Image (tube, rainbow, N blue to C red):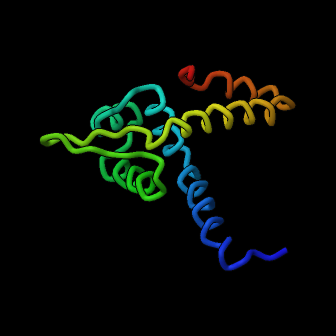
Amino acid sequence: MPLTRAQRPLYEVKAGLFKGLSHPFRIRILELLSAAEELSVAELQAETGLEASHLSQHLAVLRRHRLVASERRASHVYYRLADPKVAELLAVARALLLDVLSSDRDLLADAHALPALPAR
């Protein structure tokens, strides 16, 4: 059954959400933000090791797809998850990843070595 004219924008927003998640560094940024109430750009840069321009590009994608929110205070910009459900989504994705990798011992061992996600 094809998409109706009314349904198409909803699926485009949903696809955009997954596009926002489609880069390893963006997922890591979201994981870091799920472990903290908020982080400054400097803190995110220190944690990810990204150059400022690359971090800025990833944060712009996350903002555009409404996964993070930002607030400027004086000369610093702070980021937080736009919705607590983003952290839940990351936790479900991690569980799915472990299930998918369960048949590959080497990849599963690597997955278990990923940084811990905060409990929600």
Quadrant assignment, res 100: top right
Residue 104 pos. (x, y %): 83, 31
Residue 25 pos. (x, y %): 49, 43
* Image quadrant containing the C terminus: top right
Q: Residue at x 45, y 31 (%)?
A: 32
Q: Residue at x 60, y 71 (%)?
A: 9
Q: Residue at x 42, y 45 (%)?
A: 68
Total of numbered circles in the picture? 0
Q: Nearer the viewer, residue 27 or 79?
A: 79
In this view, the residue farthest toward the bottom is 5
Above/below status of 14 relative to 104? below
Above/below status of 49 relative to 114? below
Taking the image as shown, residue 94 lies to the left or right of residue 59, namely right
Q: Nearer the viewer, residue 35 or 114?
A: 35
Quadrant assignment, res 4: bottom right
In this view, the residue farthest toward the front is 6
Q: Residue at x 68, y 34 (%)?
A: 92
